[in-house]
Each structure stands twice: as structure tokens, then as C-alpha cells.
Image: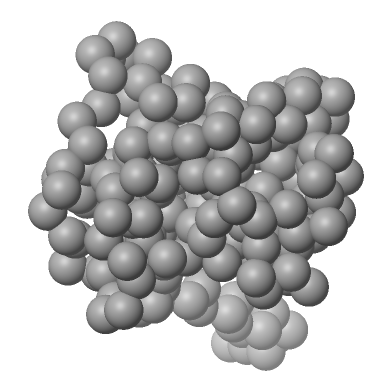
Amino acid sequence: MDHSTSAEQPAEPVPPDFPAFAVSRGRHLLRTAFLLTGGDAHLAEDLVQEALGRIFVKWRRISRLDNPSGYAQTVLVNTFLSHRRRRSSSERVTDTLPEIAVDGPDPALRLTLLRALGELPAQDRAVLVLRFWEDRSVEETAAALRLSSTAVRSRSSRALARMRATLGESLGDGGEAAGDTGGRTTTDPTGRKAVLGRVL
């Protein structure tokens, strides 16, 4: 009896467990969806569930990527944009604090920020969330949204100007008062990412 086949072929590694991945990333996905929807907690939950469903179908391939978490965020953003294309009605901004909210942030600032986000076009909102909450570079944001780097910079600068008009100094310049310079924002803990974090 020939046992050479089983001896020569090592067993293929089992991919990471999808339920464990969904649990570990679910909270962050929900926070991102909450910002994308301008504060609609129910829609945020629906988008996360739909995104996780899409990821599950391709999980064996996705689990082998260098950054499955980053891929999941891209799937969520594209799920949001697809939803906006399917439904032309504007989002409902709620003044009910989401379950994921933390103690401390000023409720008035939270609601003002959510309203300001909700008034932005969906793609501009996605650009801001990817750039200043997910800390993606211009190039990474462009790839995720299938836009040019120039379009990302233009949308980011325009959206920041609208947000600044609403929030004033609360938005913070983070050393980029002239617009989006394209880099990452992790070195700016008091800037735009910190402001977005105040609503979560």
C-alpha cells in the first residue's frame, strides 16, 4: 500500500474562525457604520450585518489576506454607499444615544457633529470617515472608494470646510488648516479623529 501521498502533502492550515473575527471586529464596524449613517443606530446595525454576511461568503479567501480587518472596513463602506444608491431618502438623525456610546462626551457636540455628517453627500462622508476615523491615507481611501487621489483630496477638503463651518474650532485643524495633505492622522490625537471619536 502506497502511503507516499499523505506523507508528502502537509495539511492546509485552517483559516481563522469567522465567528471570532466577527465578534472581535463587530464593535469597531458598528462605530464606523454609526458615523457613516450620521447617527442612525438601527441602520448602522443593518449595514454591519449585511457587510458581515458578504464577508462570510468569501471568508476562506479573505482570511488569507494580510489585513482582513481593513478589508472588512472597505466592505462596510461600500455596503453603505450601495445602500445610499438604492434608497434616495436622506438619513434620519436620532438624538437617542447609541449603546456603543461612552460616558463623557458633550451630547450637544455629539448631535451637532452627527447632523453635520448627515448633511454631507454620502461619498464625502465616506471619505472623511476613512481618512480621519479609519486613518487611511489618500491613496488607500482612493482605492477603497474607487476614486482618484485628486478626487479624494477635493472631497475631503470640501467636506472639512462644511464641517468646520458647522463646528468651528471644535473640528480642529490638526496642522492641516489649508486642507487634506494626504498623510495619516495618528500623530494628531487632538485633531479630527479625536473629534469624530467624541460621538462614540
Q: Image height check: is 114 above or below 11?
A: above
Foreground: 20 or 161?
Answer: 161
Seen as rendered, the residue at the extreme top is 88
Quarter containing the N terminus: bottom right
Seen as rendered, the residue at the extreme left is 96
Q: Image height check: is 99 above or below 72?
A: below
Q: Position of residue 166 (x, y in %)?
A: 48, 36
Foreground: 6 or 44?
Answer: 44
Left or right of 161: which side holds 59? left
Tell me what residue is drawn at x 48 percent, y 76 percent: 16
Number of marks in picture: 0
Quarter containing the C terminus: bottom left
Q: Residue 66 sits in which quadrant?
A: bottom right
Tell me what residue is drawn at x 52 percent, y 60 percent: 195
Q: Residue 133 sits in which quadrant?
A: bottom right
Q: Residue 146 sits in which quadrant?
A: top right
Q: Image height check: is 109 above or below 84?
A: below
Q: Position of residue 93 (x, y in %)?
A: 22, 37
Tell me what residue is drawn at x 36 percent, y 55 percent: 109
Tell me what residue is drawn at x 82 percent, y 50 percent: 176
Q: Is residue 69 visible?
A: no
Q: Position of residue 148 (x, y in %)?
A: 81, 24
Q: Position of residue 155 (x, y in %)?
A: 69, 25
Q: Is residue 132 visible?
A: yes
Left or right of 191: which side holds 43? left
Foreground: 14 or 112?
Answer: 112
Q: Image height check: is 83 above or below 12?
A: above
